[in-house]
Amino acid sequence: MSDNIPVIHAIPVLKDNYTWLLETSPGYAVLLDPGDGSASVAALQRHHLTLTHILITHHHQDHIGGVSDLARLTGAKVVGHALDAGRLPPLDLACHDGDSLTLGPWTCEVLATPGHTIGHVVYRIADALFTGDTLFSLGCGRLFEGTPAMMWDSMKKIRGLSGIQRIFPAHEYTLANLGFVLQLEPGNPFLSSFREWVHQQTDLGVPTLPTTMERELRCNPFLRADETDFAARIGLGGKTGVEVFTHIRTMRNHY
Ligand code: ZN
Ligand code: FE
């Protein structure tokens, strides 16, 4: 089974969040960032799945709103970063950077990616990376708690992971991010097909996620802040990766 890739469903919740539902083995599943309990329960019932674990990326309400109800209702184990235990719902498994846990036939790796919040973690399961509010399609999270240097390190950490194909962020921000990226780097040849696809998905009212590592490495400016050609094209030639990252993060705040 580990040669295959897990089946993952999108559950749109709240304004523009996604809770991801991953089938671990026949009849069993885990949820990532259930911001809304009832939407998650409905999805579990629709797919005839028993919940075993709830994985939390960070402490913001839109990611944890449904955790306590779901845990009480299903007995699922709640997983999160030990560093943030004080501001997360009670954890059954308090993890640290680099920890692994077993989810059915899969190994799930916990990776600390501070920046959006200090205790933010992402989860890797097979080819899939669940990035919460650290990495979005064509964007990255706002720096509510961390420094630009921290977030840039988190970008490099994600970029350096081998074997990741699908990326599952927690928000549908792709269309807004696309506008910013087209303005920043209109000459990027990879953006035109991406743009067409994003508009097509948006017109159909279906998610633009998951995205792919390949596409983000070509198009997401926050993963490319140390690309010399890119920096030169956006008028920041000669700046370091962290300087370019800081600059474009600030530009995005004001876009
Ligand atoms: Zn957040
Ligand atoms: Fe969020």
Image (tube, helix red, strand yellow):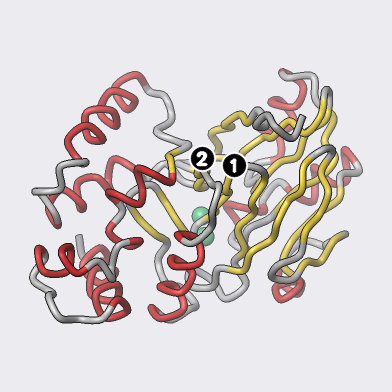
Q: Nearer the viewer, residue 145 or 21?
A: 21
Q: Is residue 238 above or below residue 215?
A: below
Circle on res. 47: none
Q: Position of residue 18 (x, y in %)?
A: 54, 40
Residue 245 placement, left or right of 232? right
Crowdedness of circle 1 by 10 Å Cα count: few (<14), some, many (20+)? some
Alpha carbons under labels 1 and 2: distance apart: 6 Å
- Circle 1 sits on which residue? 127
Q: Secondary structure at mark 1?
A: loop
Q: Is residue 24 left or right of residue 110?
A: right
Quadrant into which the C terminus falls: bottom left
- In-image side of 207 versus 194 (left or right): right
Q: For residue 236, what is the image quadrant?
A: bottom left
Which quadrant would the N terminus be assigned to in this image?
top right
Towards the viewer: 111 or 227: 227
> What crowding class fits label 2: few (fewer than 14 Cα within 10 Å), some (14-19), or many (20 or more)?
some
- Residue beneath disc 2: 166
Q: Are marks 1 and 2 in contact (CB under 8 Å)?
A: yes
Based on the displayed image, in which of its 4 quarters is residue 207 positioned?
Answer: top left
Q: Looking at the image, is mark 1 or mark 2 earlier in the sequence?
A: 1
